[in-house]
Structures are given as C-alpha cells and as structure tokens.
Image: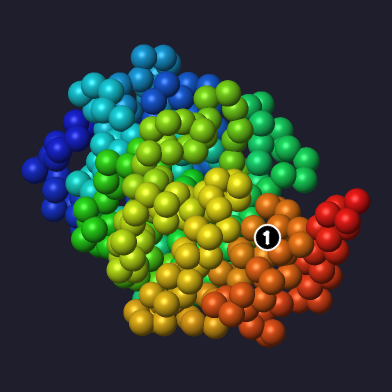
Amino acid sequence: MNRTEKSSLHDPVNMKNEFSMLPKITVCMAAYNAAGYINESIQSILDQTFEDFELLIINDGSTDQTLDIVNEFKDPRIRLVNNDKNRGLTYTRNVALTEARGEYIAILDSDDVAVPNRLELQYTFFQEHPDFALCGGHGTVIDKTGKHVEDNRFIVPVGADKIKMTLLFQNTFINSTVMYKSAVLRELNGYLDYAPAEDYELFTRISAKYQVNNLDCILVKYRIHDNNISIVQSETGREKVFAIKQNQLTQLQIEPDERTSKALFSLLEGDFNASSFTDYLSLFTRLKTANQSLKKYPQIPFEKVLFNYWFQIIYIKRAKMNALSLLLNKNLFKWSFVSLRQLRKTFKLSINGIGSISK
C-alpha cells in the first residue's frame, strides 16, 4: 500500500524499522500534470531487474488526474510526496535532498520510460567505480504514443575525461538517465535556481569536483511531445545557460566579459555565426592558456577539442581565401591535430575564395 506524505513528515513509531531497511536507490520522479504518461513511467521502474529501490514521486500541485493515477499503484516501494502548491521544477527536484533514503538518487522524468535493467547497470557501475559521483547513459527517442522514432537516439559522450571537457561546451547528460551519489547531491546543495537549465548547472558543479561518466548503453526511452521544453529557445533558458557559461569562465580564471561569454554560449547553440573569428580565436586561446595553468583538463586532448571547434567555425563561416591561414594559426594549430580531410576542406575554401575574387 503506497503512502501519501507531506514533504517533511515521518512516522516516529516506525522510524526504527524504516531506517533499518533503507533502499540502495531512490528513484525520484517529479510530476506536474503528467497524467498522459506517468503510468508507463512508474511501471518501468516497478519492472526493474534491480529491486532494492524506492520510487519517490513528488507531485507538484497537479490539476489533472496525475494524483489519481499514482494512487492506483499499491506497490509498497512507492512513496508519494505532495507539494503544498505548484512550486516549480527546481524546488520539486530538491525535495530529494530531504526525502530520499537511498545511497544513490536516480532521476526519471514523469514522461520517460526506463529500460528494464537501467538501475542494475548503474548500481553495478558505482560498485565497481566508487570514486565516481554521477553516472548517466544514452537514450532512444519515442513519440507521444510511445512509438520509437526511427533512427533517432540521444548518444552522449562516454569517458570521464571526454565528458569533463565537453561539459564546458555542451550538456553531456540526459537528465532522465542520471544517477547521483546522494551524499554528493546534498553536499553541493542540490539544484540551484537555473531552471530550465538547472540540471546542466548541477552537472557542471559535480564534474568540477568529482569523477563523472556515462554508460555506453541505452538507459531510457526519451519521450518527445508538445510540452517538451527547449531550453535555448526560451528567453529564460538562454539567460540561465548564459549565466552558466559565465560561471564556467570564472572557474577557469577568465574574465567573463560579454563577448567571451557570448562566444562560448554560441558553441552550445551551434550558432557559429554569432561571434567573429577574432572573438572565437580569443576565447580558444584563453581557454588553452588557462588550462595549461590550472590543469583542469588533460592538456593535449583539450587542445585538440579547441582546434576541432576552430576548424568547424572556419568551415561553417566560410572563411574563403583566409581559411588556410586561420587554420594554421600558431595559437591553436599542431600538425598532430589536423586531419587530411580538414586540410582538403580548408584548402578548397581558400581556392574558392581566390576564384571568386578573380571573376
């Protein structure tokens, strides 16, 4: 029989028995007007091959049938917490800081579906890698009816060093796949006020202090529907992500002025026309110098990442006759970084540029 509780309510009579049987994992599911999908999301957790968990569902003031659907489940591993009113995603996710009893906290959004062995795979990873604080994985895409979207997957970077480097430029985790060490989440005070990018901001803080990784396998079915929030397409989302970029520059001891922050932010958007060649070159040079001093990322792989971004910018912005000289810039270029394909493309840009002038 599942229980409906208020956020900070415990039963003192049963507290001793309750804490003598703490689950290994708390699965946290924030729910707001999720009646269309939450039944399938809950069932995907109850059907897990790993059984030592609790499912903590936080109802954030839903006005549809969400609460009725949750209450239809009678599995004792389900705990329901009702916010006193609609509090928003950041507050609701942070209920886990006080309510979760598991050694690990796994996130599943109320419209997504966990694959049957998701918890088992992640728990095994943490047992084999006790120094890691965060683990995620890939996702496959389904539509609002639950049908797989053909050839559409969210494949995230794998490998601790690669993820740490890539987080500077992109979000490298699918929120519905992540599992945290509960102690780390509490130590870092959970999610901060960066909604709808609060997950990305938390990932950057965790990775700055602890090892993080993704499993090279599908962990969730990620549902695309009309109510999905596109972070960078909302004005609030853009402002929050821009602030995250400024924080990242500050942590690298780089002054987060408007032009530098804008150049870094544009890499996440994929809008390489947002800044000038000069601004991108300045950003990459400063990032390279800062890392040589602070040693935050492995030096050679990081500098190769910077060079590859530099090549993409040269090619997409169609540098034309200046392309080759830009690519060979002494601040970023090393022969060991460049591929024959990149050289051919850059040389072709330069030739086309010369040809257009001679016409």
Q: Give the x, y percent position of residue 270.
A: 60, 48
Query: Residue type at mark 1?
Result: Ile
Q: Is residue 296 visible?
A: no
**Colour setting:** rainbow
In the picture provided, is 161 more to the left or to the right than 210?
right
Which sits in the foreground, 91 or 10?
91
Q: 137 above or below 4?
A: below
Asked which quadrant contains residue 28, the reply is: top left
Q: Give the x, y percent position of residue 187.
A: 21, 61
Asked which quadrant contains residue 354, the reply is: bottom right
> Residue at the location (49% across, 38% down)?
232
Which sits in the foreground, 355 or 33?
355
Q: Secondary structure at mark 1?
A: helix
The quarter of the image holding the N terminus is top left
Q: Give the x, y percent position of residue 104.
A: 35, 59
Which sits in the foreground, 95 or 56?
95
> Residue at the location (42% across, 56% down)?
260
> Residue at the location (68% across, 60% down)?
314
Q: Give the x, y percent position of residue 200.
A: 41, 50
Q: Which residue is mark 1?
A: 314
